[in-house]
Amino acid sequence: MKSEKFQMPSLDQKQTETAVLLGVVTLTLLWGYFNSLWAVAQFWDSPEYSHGYLVPMFTLALLWMRREELPGQDQISASARWVGLALIALGLSIRLPAAYYNFAPVDGLTFLPCLAGVVLLVAGWPTLRWAGPAIGFLIFMYPLPGPLQRNLLAPLQKVATLASAYSLQTLGFDVYTEGNRISISEIDMNVVEACSGLRMLTIFMALAVATTLVTKRPWWEQAIIILSAVPIALISNITRITITGILHVLVGSELADAVFHDFAGWIMMPIAIALLYLELYVLSLLFIEESETVDGMPFAFAGASGGPQPKPPRGPKIR
């Protein structure tokens, strides 16, 4: 019996030409935006946006995973070229005053319409539809606007404080709150801005969107997955604060602080990934698509009519 060697799927000539052309033009655009993108990268050293390094890497990985769907280089319509030029002009017209007044967040964001315009200009509508999800995902490498971040911090701190105190009280600990301070067995824990859960919210939101991009599901299921990032982030942060309070009482402050500041991030991320996978699996069991039926009946009832009994799908579908 001959063993078959695994062969990497290859692109045809038209797809290769499209990929090379897009690569050259994109590198030119990156060179023009190097200073603003470098300014954005400085935010990635902060705890809230430490996932920023992963966003461009995932974007490239997503394009590579979808490389077989890359359209070939055909004749580009005049409407595509004009809309592409309009997007580039829009991005640059916003960038010039933003750069002049040193408004770095807006300066960096103009890279996205310019990138979409370049793809549309040199490769047309089919290629923009192919690359659009990856381009849109790049929004997660940018920090939140200052006013939005400030308006999110206070409510997140309040929710984290009250919910963690309630969890500790449910477990039998003597706890009361004062502002954003949790008092437990004569020990005070301050839920400061860094403990608000904003970091987890931004990371889990990016993770949820990335999950919808690599799984094949209806739009409403994708919306559920994205919206679920908010409760998952809140649950993870509340769990972290609750465990810290328990450790303060049972073990001591030194170990509790070490777990809270050093190990919590590593512990919460696998938990969040597990929750997302569990959510995907439950959705796969609850809802049956038309392609998962036999003669118009779900798999579960196909066998009763004497028809074939294929196995139901298990787990999330990967693109």
Image (spheres, rainbow, N blue to C red):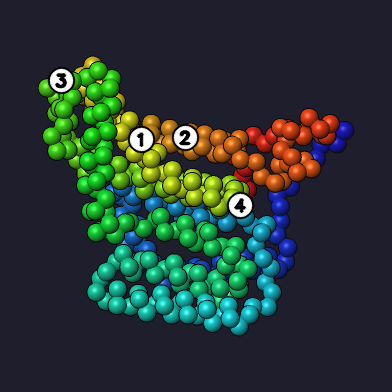
Q: Nearer the viewer, residue 139 or 171?
A: 171
Q: Quadrant of residue 260?
A: top left
- The reply to whether the C-beta atoms of the residues labelled 4 and 3 are less than 8 Å apart is no
Residue highlighted by disc 4: 65
Q: Is residue 187 left or right of residue 314?
A: left
- Please tell me the numbered disc located at residue 185: 3
Residues at marks 3 and 1, CA–CA distance in whole angstroms: 23 Å
Q: Is residue 13 left or right of 92 when viewed as pictured?
A: right
Q: Quadrant of the N terminus?
A: top right
Residue at 15%, 34% in the rendered image = 181
> Residue 113's spot in the image, x, y percent?
45, 70
Secondary structure under the numbered disc 2 in the rendered image: helix
Q: Quadrant of residue 196?
A: top left
Question: Are the residues at dot 2 and dot 1 in contact (C-beta closer than 8 Å)?
Answer: yes
What's the distance in space between the residues labelled 2 and 1, CA to CA? 11 Å
In the rendered image, which quarter is residue 47 located in?
A: top left
**Is the C-beta separation of discs 4 and 2 under 8 Å?**
no
For residue 148, above or below residue 101: above
Disc 2 target residue? 275
Query: Can you tell which mark lies on residue 174?
Result: none
Looking at the image, which residue sits at the far right?
1
Location of residue 204 in the rendering, given as x and y in whole percent from the top left corner: 41, 44
**Residue 205 in view in this figure:** yes
For the residue marked with disc 4, what is the amino acid?
Met
Contact flag, marks 2 and 3 (Cβ < 8 Å): no
The x, y position of residue 314, in whole percent, is: 64, 34
- Residue lying at 26% horizontally and 39% vertically, measured from the top left: 159
- Of pointers 4 and 1, the one earlier in the residue sequence: 4
Mark earlier in primary sequence (3, 1): 3
Mark 4 or 2: the one toward you:
2
Q: Which residue is mark 1?
A: 235
Residue at the spot x=71%, y=32% of the render? Answer: 300
